[in-house]
Image (cartoon, rainbow, N blue to C red):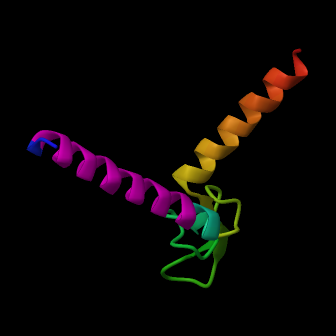
Amino acid sequence: MTPSSSASLLLFAALLIVTLGYIASCVLWPFKACRTCHGEGKFRSPFIRAVRLCGACKSTGLRPRAGLKAWNAYRRLHRKNRRNR
């Protein structure tokens, strides 16, 4: 084995481990806290007790992660192609 092939094999193995780890974390935690409302689902006025619901997450406080968005796009495309046969 040459040093360049062993280095590329090591890089490939590291990339595979990181990718599988991200997929596993997307399976366990498919949503993340909304950046707009910081996961609360609502906004409070700084001076009065008024409350307004967050429009970005539709007041759930959760947003889908990038991996879940990619998986949903793949599934949507797969279903569309299966119906057109």
Return the x and y of residue 34 as percentages of the image width and height: 55, 65
Residue found farthest to the front = 1
Q: In the image, is 52 to the left or to the right of 21?
A: right
Q: In the image, is 13 to the left or to the right of 83?
A: left
Return the x and y of residue 43 as percentages of the image width and height: 58, 72
Question: Which is nearer the eye, 17 or 42?
Answer: 17
Q: Residue at x 72, y 29 (%)?
A: 77
> In terms of secondary structure, what is the magenta stretch mainly?
helix
Q: Within the image, what quadrant is residue 18 found in?
A: bottom left
Residue found farthest to the left = 3
Quadrant location of the C terminus in the rendered image: top right
Quadrant location of the N terminus in the rendered image: top left
Q: Within the image, what quadrant is residue 64 found in?
A: bottom right
Image height of 70 relative to 33, above or below: above
Image height of 21 relative to 6, above or below: below
What segment is highlighted magenta in the picture?
4-25
Q: Residue at x 59, y 43 (%)?
A: 70
